[in-house]
Image (tube, grey):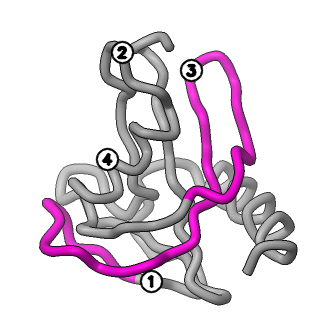
Amino acid sequence: MCSHKVVIGIVMRGREFLMVFNPRRGWEFPGGRVEPGEQPEDAVQRELLEEAGVVGRVLSKIYEDSNLVVYLVKFEKFSGEGEFESRFFKELPEPLAFSDGEARLFLKIAFQNAISFL
C-alpha cells in the first residue's frame, strides 16, 4: 500500500466517539500516515495505540479517497498512555484541527454504520 495514504479511526463507545488533542492543531480523530509495507488497517490500529493508548476492533472501512482511509472502530480498552490527551465526546469539541464539515461527514457515516455493529 502507498505510504502517502493517511488513516483515521472513528472510535465508537456506544453513542460517543474518541478524539485526541494535538496542542498544535486542536481536537482531531486519531490517525496518521501508513508506513511503507504496512496495510491501512494495521496503520490505524498502530496510530490508535500511539496517539490515544487505545485498543479497538476495526469494524469497517467507511470512507476512502486517493489520500485518506477512514475506519469505524469499536473501542475495546485503554492500554497505557497515548502521546495526546484523549476523550470520548457526544458533540464535536472546539477547537477542531480540521473542518467542521469534514468531521460531521465522517461522524454521520460512522453512526450510520455503527448501528449494525454496536
Residue 13 falls in which quadrant of the image? bottom right
Mark 3 surroundings: few (<14), some (14-19) or many (≥20) residues within 10 A: few
Please state the extent of the stretch shown in magenta in the rendering.
Answer: 58-87
User: Distance from label 2 to label 1 (Cα)?
Assistant: 31 Å
Q: Label 3: which residue?
A: 67
Q: Can you give x and y, in whole percent of width and height, for residue 83 in the image?
A: 14, 60
Q: Nearer the viewer, residue 65 or 73?
A: 73
Image mark for residue 37: 2
User: Distance from label 2 to label 3 (Cα)?
Assistant: 16 Å
* Position of 82 relative to 50 (above/below): below
Camera-side mark, 2 or 3: 2
Which amino acid, by three-letter code, is at mark 4?
A: Arg
Q: Label 4: which residue?
A: 46
Which amino acid, by three-letter code, is at mark 3?
A: Asn
Mark 2 surroundings: few (<14), some (14-19) or many (≥20) residues within 10 A: few
Q: Of marks 1 and 4, which one's residue comes earlier in the chain?
A: 4
Which amino acid, by three-letter code, is at mark 2?
A: Gly
Q: Nearer the viewer, residue 12 or 103?
A: 12
Q: How many marks?
A: 4
Question: Are discs 1 and 3 less than 8 Å apart at CB?
Answer: no
Image mark for residue 88: 1
